[in-house]
Image: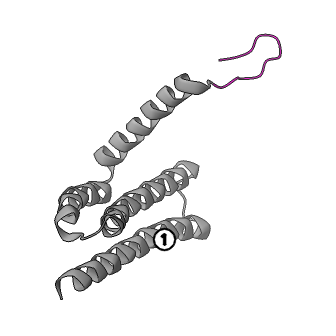
Amino acid sequence: MTDSDNGYTTKNTGFKRFYHASIYSWQGLKAAYAQEPAFRYEVWGSAVLIPLAFFVAQSPMQLAALISTCLLVLAFELVNTAIEAVVDRAGTEFHELAGLAKDLGSAVVMVSLGIGALIWWAVLWTNFA
């Protein structure tokens, strides 16, 4: 929306902004699921692990930790996908910094998977060992 008096673009506020932001977020999730196999794998893994968390956790804090690790992996995969999209958009020629950006994005996902595995292991060990 453009303010005709000053030429500046004004942003929606309140519920209208929330509504549009929700639509854009949903479009991003759908695009990631459609275009990124790793995101699909992690969604399906989360679809198994999140319900399992309700059986494994013995406290609200454990439940929150187990579910949060699944969501953390998905969030970092979305960030990694965004980084890859921006780098790919910038150009097709090889550049050392473009490769570094993609590798670092991938590393963040790997670290988040490690955090998730560690937390799941600790909760399982605490509750069932």
21 or 55: nearer the viewer: 55
Task: Characterize the magenta stretch by its predominant secondary structure.
Answer: loop
Q: What residue is at 36 percent from the left and 47 percent from the top? A: 32
**Residue 55 appears left or right of 79:** left
* Image quadrant where one finds the N terminus: top right
Queried whether the magenta region covers residue 99, the answer comes back as: no
> Helix or strand or loop: what does disc 1 sit on?
helix
Image quarter of residue 94: bottom right
**Residue 78 appears left or right of 45:** right
69 or 122: nearer the viewer: 122
**Type of amino acid under label 1:** Asp
Tell me how many marks there are: 1
**Residue 80 vertical placement versus 18 (above, below):** below
Residue 119 drawn at (x, y percent): 34, 77
**Residue 54 vertical placement versus 89 (above, below):** below
Residue 22 drawn at (x, y percent): 45, 33
Q: Which residues are magenta?
A: 1-11
Q: What residue is at 37 percent from the left and 43 percent from the top? A: 29
**Residue 24 vertical placement versus 81 (above, below):** above
92 or 83: nearer the viewer: 83
**Which residue carries the number 1 mark?**
103
Residue 57 drawn at (x, y percent): 24, 69
**Residue 64 appears left or right of 127:** right
